[in-house]
Amino acid sequence: MSRREATELLLKYVERVQFGQVRRGYNCAIQTRSVPEFFPIRIKNLCENLRSALDYLALDIWNLYGQKGTKDPKVYFPIQGSLEEYAKYAGKLFPDLKPKNPELWKFLERMQPVPGSDERWLGEFDSLNNRSKHLDLVLHRSRSAPVGHPKADEFGPVVHLDEQTNEWVEFRFVEPDVNALMLIHSAVVGARFIVNETIDLLP
């Protein structure tokens, strides 16, 4: 199996199997207001597979534009918090990328979760993925607010109406402090977009 085939297989597994498991776990969490037993591990595995797909993609880029002669290079998909950090990291990892494929360079630059970017999810995903390696995902919290309460306006778009208490309930990660299902959904959709767009820009 080629690396590109492995990337596609990972994405399909996340999309067709793992995301459904996480969505069901989220629904259970907000209805019971407790963390299902295997929910953190399912999120951990999903994050690891998405990260692997992005890193496989980075290896494809490195094979074309990386510094040749490097033994066992440590190649990771660039996720940086500023354009300066992106330029430094990607320029060192892929020295031939900017001069030989400026369109791909600009696309990867546009994907960086810099302040004001629409791609904030990528930084949140990176933070979540790093925490999940240590199973810190047990640190979740739910929050609720009565219907019509001003605090309910701060909730994410994936919430549950508890008809017994007349409260909106959502389930969030502690760090990053975001709606759990919304971040996972954004990561699944975003990783697919990055992979497809990058492959289209590769020779």
Image (spheres, grey):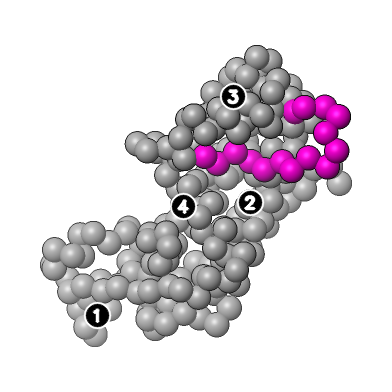
**Which residue was labeled with disc 3?**
105
Who comes first in sequence, dot 3 or dot 1? 3
Query: Residue 164's quadrant in the figure?
Result: bottom left
Region rendered in magenta: 66-80
Q: Label 4 to label 2, Cα distance in Å?
A: 13 Å
Q: Is residue 137 left or right of residue 62?
A: left
Asked if marks 4 and 3 touch (Cβ < 8 Å), the reply is no
Q: Residue at x 54, y 32 (%)?
A: 86
Image coords of residue 191 (percent x, y): 57, 45
Would you say residue 191 is visible in this rendering? yes
Which residue is rendered at x = 68% and y = 32% of the image?
Answer: 93
Queried whether the magenta region covers residue 39, the answer comes back as: no
Magenta run includes residue 68: yes
What residue does disc 1 label? 163
Which amino acid is tagged 4?
Glu
Q: Name the N-terminal-most of marks 2 and 1.
A: 2
Of pointers 1 and 4, the one earlier in the residue sequence: 4
On the image, numbered disc 2 is attached to which residue? 51
Residue 8: % across, % down: 71, 46
Instruction: Identify whether 69 is placed above or below 71.
Output: above
| Cα–Cα span, label 2 and label 1 | 38 Å
- Sort mark 2 into few (<14), some (14-19) or many (20+) by Cα contacts within 10 Å: many
Q: Viewer-proximal residue, 107 or 115?
A: 115
**Residue hosting label 4:** 124
Q: Distance of mark 4 from mark 3, alpha carbons?
A: 22 Å
Q: Nearer the viewer, mark 3 or mark 1?
A: 3
Q: Is residue 7 left or right of residue 35?
A: right
Q: Amino acid at mark 3?
A: Trp
What is the x, y in percent for residue 124? 46, 52
Q: Answer whether residue 8 is visible to the viewer in this image.
A: no
